[in-house]
Image (cartoon, rainbow, N blue to C red):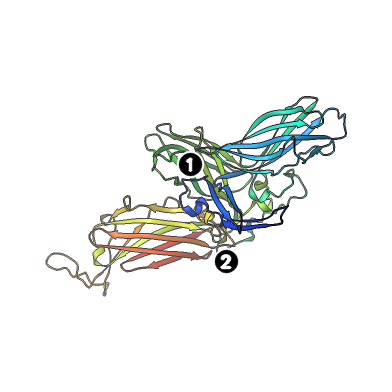
């Protein structure tokens, strides 16, 4: 998804004339419209004397299907069988269906495909299909024996999308043939595997967990193997407003915890065009022991969506297979209503420290002596190289600590706070004029603790905690200040301060 490019280098077989061209493909990430995911695009690539029309699609929440087809026979009368016909895959977007050819040889074609008892696998033009996680994969096949033009198989089968699993189906055919369709759902880093090796395969690289080998100097804090849940994206066909209730739970070796919980009388309103569901209960890290699972049980008051399902633990993650760790994953939980789904962005860090965060806004000066403070904007955590290398990672693999609009700010009345009067002579009482107000020589400071939607994040031991602060702090009719800065907090550092005129933002970190 990061600046993909298409290059074409073709030659006319008869004339020898070349057609060379290239183009950069746009993605939904660059358009910054995440609610318009999975859009088919068409571009024209122009060469010196040719042009090519290219249709493509950037699958924002996709899962990869590695497909394989095998033709068997109970009794082989010939040493080999030549077949022709078609095999194509189909899935549905929110507005249309997409068909992808996997195998096509016409009866009149000079091409050939031979199947033998020793080599029953049918060679494909392509063997990997990217499928939107909320959809399905339907495969149609029509194969004929070229020797006698008798039909071998004509049927279809449907596979539900999965985060990581393998399925197969055997289709009975005519003339003692049987046709096996296999689909392995894979993450991108597994696409080059010839096949998914068994869990006990010696080719897998397992790591020994050394929980206490990574400690902070002069501290009891130590790194652990943890599951980090970054964000939850709620997709639905028309992006209408939702009123969601239910819960999202994470279970680890210590128990089950709510990271979102609303009842039917206090639903969370997901505005029209918005897709992010705040994870309100992430106030601890999830220790990866022998088990973990994330379950989603969400409903809309008006029955517009119903999303129920789970992201189970992957055995290879649990057993610490090296390539499954410290990666950014997206797992899909499909809704009952077609086109509705929850995309869970998560990772398992082999060694990570727990960071508990507190954010205060310090108002300074006489104008801060009374009134109601308003704070809006965002505070977002990133994780160095783990979440900043691509636009996709920055958009989905981050932790939102605070996000408020100007229309819905975080407010605190100063009547609830103790006024700190820093006097030139702290032993003297402040001078009050006839009206009972403090003199201009006195300095006022009022500290407001910002209420965070989540206060705990896991930070990989070889990374830094990056906090993007973009806040507007104001006291209506008095002043307004905007502070924006990216903080790079090294593991072990306990405080960062953003200085501003009349306002400071203080970020405190407790490591464990």
The quarter holding residue 262 reads top left
Dot 1 crowding, Cα within 10 Å, few <14, some 14–19, many 20+: many
Residue 326 location in percent, x, y?
61, 55
Farthest residue, direction left? 434
Whole-number angstrom distance, CA of label 2 to CA of label 1: 44 Å
User: Mark 2 or mark 1, which is nearer to you?
Assistant: 1
The disc placed on residue 235 is: 1
Q: Residue at x 77, y 41 (%)?
A: 110
Point out residue 308 in the picture as x, y percentages from the top left corner. Answer: 52, 35
Is 463 situated above or below 255? below
Any part of residue 494 in sight: no
Vertical side of 87 occupied by 460: above or below = below
Q: Of the numbered discs in the image, which one, if any, rests on residue 82?
A: none
Give whichever of 48, 385 is nearer the camera.
48
Q: Earlier in the sequence, mark 2 or mark 1?
A: 2
Residue occupying the point 61% across, 36% down: 90
Apparent side of residue 474 relative to residue 214 in the rendered image (left or right): left
Residue identified by numbered label 2: 217
Taking the image as shown, residue 211 lies to the left or right of residue 229, namely right
User: Which residue is nearer to you in this view: 56 or 269?
Assistant: 56
In the current view of this chain or complex, which residue is farthest to the front? 15
Image x and y of residue 396, in percent = 51, 51
Label 2: which secondary element: loop
Q: From the viewer's perspective, tell me whether residue 320 is left or right of residue 352.
A: right
């Amino acid at each position: 998804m990061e600046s993909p490019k298409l290059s074409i280098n073709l030659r006319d077989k008869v004339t020898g004339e070349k057609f060379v061209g290239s183009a950069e493909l746009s993605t939904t990430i660059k358009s910054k419209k995440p609610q318009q995911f999975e859009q088919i695009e068409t571009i024209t690539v122009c060469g010196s004397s040719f042009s090519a029309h290219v249709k493509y699609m950037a699958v924002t929440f996709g899962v990869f299907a590695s497909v394989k087809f095998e033709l068997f026979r109970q009794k082989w009368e010939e040493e080999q069988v030549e077949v022709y016909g078609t095999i194509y895959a189909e899935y549905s977007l929110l507005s249309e269906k997409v068909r992808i050819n996997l195998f096509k040889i016409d009866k009149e074609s000079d091409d050939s495909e031979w199947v033998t008892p020793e080599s029953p696998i049918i060679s494909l033009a392509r063997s990997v299909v990217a499928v939107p996680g909320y959809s399905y994969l339907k495969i149609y096949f029509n194969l004929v024996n070229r020797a006698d033009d008798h039909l071998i198989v004509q049927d279809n089968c449907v596979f539900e999308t999965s985060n990581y699993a393998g399925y197969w189906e055997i289709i009975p055919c005519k003339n003692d043939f049987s046709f096996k369709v296999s689909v392995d759902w894979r993450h991108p880093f597994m696409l080059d595997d010839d096949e998914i090796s068994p869990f006990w395969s010696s080719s897998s690289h397992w790591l020994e967990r050394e929980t206490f080998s990574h400690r902070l100097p002069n501290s009891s804090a130590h790194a652990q193997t943890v599951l980090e849940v970054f964000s939850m994206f709620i997709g639905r066909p028309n992006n209408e407003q939702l009123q969601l209730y239910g819960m999202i739970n994470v279970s680890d070796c210590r128990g089950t915890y709510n990271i979102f919980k609303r009842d039917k009388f206090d639903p969370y309103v997901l505005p029209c065009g918005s897709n992010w569901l705040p994870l309100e209960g992430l106030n601890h890290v999830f220790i990866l022991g022998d088990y973990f699972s994330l379950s989603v049980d969400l409903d809309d008051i008006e029955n517009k969506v119903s999303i129920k399902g789970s992201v189970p633990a992957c055995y290879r993650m649990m057993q610490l297979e090296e390539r499954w760790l410290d990666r950014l994953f997206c797992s899909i939980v499909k809704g009952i209503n077609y086109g509705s789904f929850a995309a869970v962005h998560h990772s398992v860090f082999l060694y990570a420290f727990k960071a508990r965060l507190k954010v205060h806004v310090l108002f300074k000066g006489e104008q801060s002596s009374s009134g109601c403070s308003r704070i809006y904007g965002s505070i977002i955590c990133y994780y160095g190289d783990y979440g900043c290398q691509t636009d996709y990672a920055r958009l989905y693999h981050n932790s939102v600590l605070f996000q408020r609009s100007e229309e819905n700010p975080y407010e605190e009345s100063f009547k609830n706070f103790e006024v700190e009067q820093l006097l030139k002579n702290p032993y003297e009482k402040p001078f009050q004029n006839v009206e009972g107000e403090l003199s201009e020589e006195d300095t006022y400071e009022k500290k407001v603790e910002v209420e965070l939607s989540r206060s705990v994040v896991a930070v990989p031991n070889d990374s830094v905690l990056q906090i993007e602060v973009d806040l507007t702090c104001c006291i209506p009719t008095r002043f307004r200040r905007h502070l924006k800065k990216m903080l790079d907090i090294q593991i072990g550092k306990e405080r960062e301060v953003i200085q501003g005129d009349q306002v400071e933002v203080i970020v405190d970190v407790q490591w464990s």
